[in-house]
Image (cartoon, grey):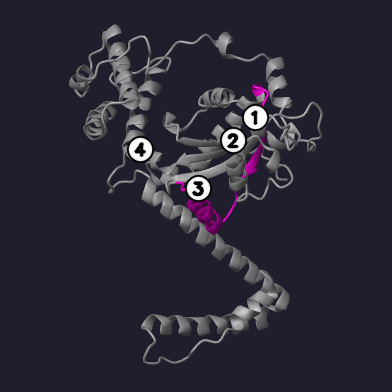
Amino acid sequence: MSSHCFAIHLSRPLSRSIDSNSSLYVYIMNRLYLFFTRVIRRLARTLGVGAFMMFAERAYQRALLSHNAEYDQQRFIRSAALPGKAFTQRNLAALITIDYHRLEKGLALAAPRPRFGVDVLTRMDRDINAYVARFGRNSLVDTAIASLNAYKKFHVQDNHQLPVEFPNKLVEEYPDTDSKTKAGGTKHICTPEVMLSEDDAKQLFQTRHSIRQFVHRPVAVETIRLAVACALHTPSVCNRQTWELYYVDDREVIDDVLSFQNGNRGFGHSAAGVFLVTVDLERFVSVEERNQGWIDGGMFAMSLIWALHSLGVASCALNWSTNRHRDRKFRDAMQLPESLSIIMMIAVGYPPAELVVAYSKKRAVDDVLHVNCLPTHKGASTE
């Protein structure tokens, strides 16, 4: 904010009196404006012009932060499955997913505790019945029932008595539709089969770059679907998989989408497609999860970038660090639901055989990694 702009705002004339057409609100705001104008001018005289302008800039930035934070806060309140509101289908699905995943996590321990999760069983009985009554049976219900069956199987095989809260009637009413396709519970894995070799890991991670040169060659939808299928293995809070992903490969639509993002100048026009990565706030259930969308969405976006790279598709991550006004303008133009938080965009395409990429040395491992050296630990560095 420039000093000239600040001066203009301070010198704007406001009426000091109430006429017959003025409201009480306008009068109060005028009086407050005059009061704060006097305070600001006194601060300017006391601090000096330079110090005052620094103070004013900090105050302005804090006001902007509050203004934009309030925008995010209200969207979260209106969308999340917070107590006291009528739950949407995705709200209720989130609550069910949290609970069936609690059963899965308990069963995945080295020594599961018999009769664990009694309160979870009660909630699942209530919420699944409510969900089916309103929205019918679908894959979510199948996964929840499969987790309940796995819970029951653990108790039966090890001769543990099932809790009286176990919803036998629910499980019997909605049996597995396909016993060959396991929807939920646990599965056995062999460690050597799921681990990359050191060379493979280095090959994957050290050869990826942000690419800003693309050849004129479309990326097949089948390749896009394969990359997304790989990225879906990204961990998420309680396995709620809150992501909603949009992909466009129509030139006119690509250009329209990228016109709202200012980090693609000089190369966006050559991208074969663009992803819009979002998360659905309706899949979060508490105030404590207000920032979880950025975490889940960021992890998913990176997984997608790795998946694309493994398939030979180049990409460039495009941030969506913007203010509420641009965010709202983009939402209106693309008709995005209010419940979706925009994480980022990703430009994709095939690179030429040889090209130049941006390069700067990465931070040293020891600059990033602190082993047994938490800030409150006695061995913590004071630098």
Badge nearest the viewer, 3 or 1: 1
Q: Position of residue 43 (x, y in %)?
A: 62, 80
- The one nearer the camera, 62 or 306, is 306
Q: Amino acid at mark 4?
A: Arg
Are the residues flagged by discs 2 and 1 in contact, CB closer than 8 Å? yes
Q: Earlier in the sequence, mark 4 or mark 2?
A: 4
Q: Position of residue 27 (x, y in %)?
A: 42, 85
Badge nearest the viewer, 4 or 2: 2
Q: Earlier in the sequence, mark 3 or mark 1?
A: 1
Q: Position of residue 351 (x, y in %)?
A: 74, 30
Badge nearest the viewer, 3 or 4: 3
Q: Is residue 255 above or below residue 205?
A: below
- The one nearer the camera, 368 or 383, is 368
Residue at image mark 4: 90
Residue 376 visible to an observer of this rendering: no
Give the residue at x 33% y 20%: 147
Q: Earlier in the sequence, mark 3 or mark 4?
A: 4
Q: Which residues are magenta?
A: 310-336
Using the numbered discs, state the Cα–Cα distance from disc 2 to disc 3 in whole angstroms. 15 Å
Q: Amino acid at mark 1?
A: Pro
Residue 331 colored in magenta in the image: yes
Give the residue at x 48% y 40%: 279
Give the residue at x 31% y 41%: 88
Using the numbered discs, state the Cα–Cα distance from disc 4 to disc 2 in whole angstroms. 28 Å
Residue at image mark 2: 249
Where residue 38 sits, quadrant-wise, is bottom right
Q: Earlier in the sequence, mark 2 or mark 1?
A: 1
Give the residue at x 52% y 8%: 190
Residue at image mark 3: 334
Residue at image mark 1: 218
Residue 51 colored in magenta in the image: no
Q: Quadrant of the N terminus?
A: bottom right
